[in-house]
Image: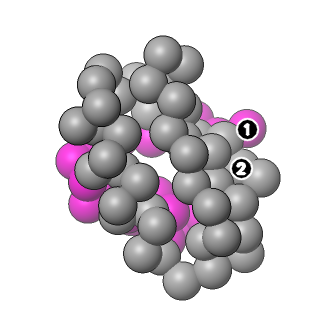
Amino acid sequence: MTTYSVPGISCDHCKRAIEGEVGQVEGVDRVEVDVAAKTVEVAGEASDAAVRAAIDEAGYEVAGVS
């Protein structure tokens, strides 16, 4: 499980957009966006670069990873 900090998350639209993009990445088993915490949790074998690119494609910027 990898957790991405995405400060631009502010609503359910953000949640749906990010989950939609990241969910299409090969190797992602599960993606969950926490609007309140402004995080994206990703489970699976997807590459960090692919997940970051999907978040970017959704219109958001990753501030950090844990």
Confirm or deny contact between disc 1 and disc 2 (CB under 8 A).
Answer: yes
Residue 50 in magenta?
yes
* Residue at the far bottom in the pictured view: 26
Quadrant of the rendered structure where residue 24 is? bottom left
Q: From mark 1 to mark 2, how far is it between C-alphas?
A: 6 Å
Which one is closest to the eye, mark 1 or mark 2?
2
Q: How is the image coloured?
A: one colour
Where residue 41 appears, as percent x and y from the top left, is: 63, 45
What residue is at 30 percent from the left and 31 percent from the top?
A: 12
What residue is at 28 percent from the left and 37 percent from the top?
A: 14
Residue 58 sits above or below residue 29 on the image:
above
One can see residue 6 in this view: yes
Magenta residues span 46-66
Q: Mark 2 packing: few (<14 Cα in 10 Å), some, or many (20+)? A: few
Residue 8 sits above or below residue 24 on the image:
above
Quadrant of the rendered structure where residue 56 is? bottom left
* Residue that label 2 marks: 2
- Amino acid under disc 1: Ser
Q: Which mark is residue 47?
A: none
- Quick one: SS at disc 2? strand
Label located before the other in sequence (1 or 2): 2
Residue 51 in magenta?
yes
Where residue 44 appears, as percent x and y from the top left, is: 72, 69
* Residue that label 1 marks: 66
